[in-house]
Image: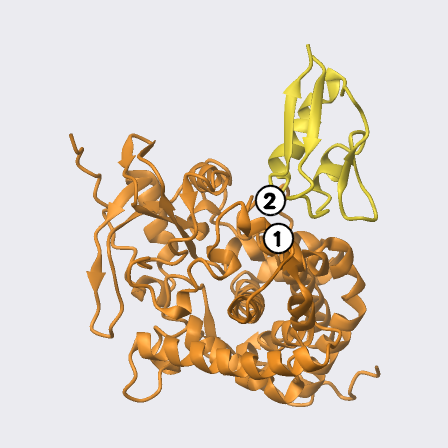
Chain colours: A orange, B yellow
């Protein structure tokens, strides 16, 4: 007998609440009324569509699903609506680490994870601070800028591009292509007349074309970068195919570029919106590591990750059927009242703060150490050199249910009188 | 009751949450892997070890009772 699915009281497939910054109200209601509920599919005029899925809004459930990659697999897609039967190449199903299941998954991850360990990250701090100083140098003699584009985006972009071996003259291209692939649902990033799918596909193909050329160069001559590591990598004696190397590069550039930018931008916005917390942090910079975790919890830059059930399974009385897609909503888990009783307060001194912004388990964010370091160094340098930075116009959020994105954040500040000495 | 902890080296990436939660039991070494220092682990360290299991971002630690 098929039991009726508890319908979701709200449609979480619609990006509009996210654009308006209202998503947290929606999630609160879901946690209270229907923590596990079935969201009907829908189709939008702009070409975006998805079949139905389960809304997973509670911390404990996101944790349980994340810890069971055998029951809840990633290879059918990790974004809402990805259907393995008709997924386009941009989804990389079965070819890209993030959409690969155990046991192959950890073998792919181990090819590169030495470059992402806490020790590897710590060794980069000096260089990351140099890059950050240069980014602030570029705006410090002005009195205003678009914080997202001119500052927040530039640091993760530089770090991942350097690690991959992308030369500086191509960083802006990587930024633009990332916006097409991950922000293709937002009209600002669509070319005239292009819909979502066309935008994403265009970004994907251009990025692949770019890395194909770079791959040929690295095969001829290795350099000290991740792309060269991938060229020489093998799993149990089998070398990665060109296609696997391209998908790996694509994943690292996208993931390394987009999410940290949003944590930094959202973090500054949170400080603007909570002046007493900002004052506390500026008065006591030793709070910065705790503030970084709170920024991550508060912004939850990855808004959702999807899994597909490999068997029928019950969750809070709801019958999830084999093949159903479940959507883990990280901003909701990160404000779950059962874990964070005052979770709707932004507190720079919050401790403990066992948030799930990086996920947990098999697919725990590979770049978490870099993200944490970049956010910390950026805010240390920013608040030290431009301490009176203020919001100077409305924030513009990305139209997406996948990425908690910020497109623009106008800011103003007193210019530095002299550039910082290196 | 005493217990045993086993770290899956395929999953372990040296994040050091275990070391922070239970420094008497876990030590991350230069190979970025966490080594279990006590076998068996005395029962009075159980709470700390369970915390380490929970906090490991890779969920790389498993524990079993020692009778």
Instruction: Check disc 1 and report the residue beneath it.
Output: A293
Q: Residues within 10 Å of mark 1 (few under 14, many from 20)?
A: many
Q: Where on the picture, by quarter, is residue A202?
A: bottom left
Whether residue B35 appears in this view of the structure is: yes
Classify A280 as above or below A103. below
Rendered-image quadrant of the N terminus of chain A: top left
Q: Where on the picture, by quarter, is residue A214?
A: bottom right
Q: Secondary structure at mark 2?
A: loop
Instruction: Check disc 2 and report the residue beneath it.
Output: A353
Q: Where on the picture, by quarter, is residue A385?
A: bottom right
Classify B16 as above or below A377. above
Q: Secondary structure at mark 1?
A: helix
The chain under label 1 reads A
Residue beneath the point at 47% across and 42% down: A69
Q: Please state which of residues A98 and A333 is positioned toward the viewer in this rendering.
A: A98
Indicate which disc residue A92 carries. Answer: none
Residue beneath the point at 64% across and 40% down: B56
Residue beneath the point at 21% across and 43% down: A7
The chain under label 2 reads A
Whether residue A363 appears in this view of the structure is: no
Classify A313 as above or below A275. above
Q: Is A143 left or right of A407, judged from the image as shown?
A: right
Q: Is A18 left or right of A353, judged from the image as shown?
A: left
- Residue A104 drawn at (x, y percent): 54, 50
Task: Answer whether labels 2 and 1 touch (C-beta < 8 Å).
Answer: yes
Q: CA distance from mark 2 to mark 1?
A: 7 Å
Looking at the image, the residue that sits furthest to the front is A237
- N-terminal-most mark, 2 or 1: 1
The number of discs equals: 2
């Amino acid at each position: 007998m098929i039991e009726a699915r508890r319908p979701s009281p709200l449609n979480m497939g619609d990006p509009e609440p996210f654009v308006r910054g209202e998503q947290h109200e929606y999630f609160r209601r879901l946690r209270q009324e229907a923590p596990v509920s079935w969201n009907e599919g829908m189709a939008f005029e702009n070409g975006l569509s998805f079949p139905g899925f389960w809304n997973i809004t509670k911390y404990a459930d996101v944790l349980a699903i994340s810890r069971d990659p055998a029951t809840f697999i990633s290879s059918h897609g990790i974004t809402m609506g990805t259907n393995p039967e008709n997924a386009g190449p941009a989804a990389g199903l079965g070819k890209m680490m993030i959409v690969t299941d155990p046991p192959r998954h950890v073998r792919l991850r181990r090819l590169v994870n030495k470059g992402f360990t806490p020790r590897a990250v710590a060794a980069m701090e000096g260089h990351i601070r140099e890059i950050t100083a240069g980014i602030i140098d570029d705006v410090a003699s002005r009195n205003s800028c678009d914080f997202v584009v001119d500052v927040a985006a530039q640091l993760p972009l530089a770090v991942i591009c350097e690690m991959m071996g992308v030369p500086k003259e191509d960083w802006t291209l990587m930024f633009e292509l990332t916006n097409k692939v991950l922000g293709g649902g937002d009209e600002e990033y669509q070319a005239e007349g292009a819909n979502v799918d066309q935008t994403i596909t265009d970004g994907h193909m251009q990025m692949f074309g770019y890395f194909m050329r770079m791959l040929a160069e690295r095969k001829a001559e290795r350099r000290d970068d991740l792309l060269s590591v991938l060229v020489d990598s093998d799993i149990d004696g089998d070398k990665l195919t060109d296609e696997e190397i391209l998908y790996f590069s694509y994943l690292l550039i996208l993931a390394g570029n987009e999410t940290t930018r949003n944590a930094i931008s959202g973090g500054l916005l949170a400080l603007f919106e909570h002046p007493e917390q900002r004052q506390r942090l500026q008065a006591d910079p030793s709070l910065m590591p705790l503030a970084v975790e709170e920024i991550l919890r508060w912004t939850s830059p990855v808004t959702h990750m999807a899994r597909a059930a490999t068997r029928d399974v019950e969750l809070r009385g709801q019958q999830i059927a084999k093949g159903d897609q479940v959507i883990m909503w990280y901003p909701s888990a990160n404000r779950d009242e059962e874990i964070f009783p005052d979770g709707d307060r932004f507190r720079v001194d919050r401790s403990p703060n066992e948030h799930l912004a990086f996920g947990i388990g098999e697919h725990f964010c590979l770049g978490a150490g870099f993200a944490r370091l970049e956010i910390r160094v950026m805010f240390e340098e920013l608040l030290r050199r431009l301490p009176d930075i203020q919001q100077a116009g409305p924030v513009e959020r990305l139209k997406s249910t996948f990425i908690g994105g910020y497109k623009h954040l106008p800011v103003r500040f007193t210019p530095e009188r002299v550039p910082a000495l290196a | 009751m005493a217990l045993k902890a086993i770290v899956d080296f395929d999953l372990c990436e040296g994040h050091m949450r275990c070391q922070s939660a239970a420094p008497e039991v876990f030590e991350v070494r230069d190979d970025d892997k966490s080594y279990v220092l006590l076998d068996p682990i005395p029962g009075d360290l159980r709470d700390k070890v369970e915390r380490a299991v929970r906090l490991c971002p890779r969920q790389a630690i498993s524990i079993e009772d020692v009778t």
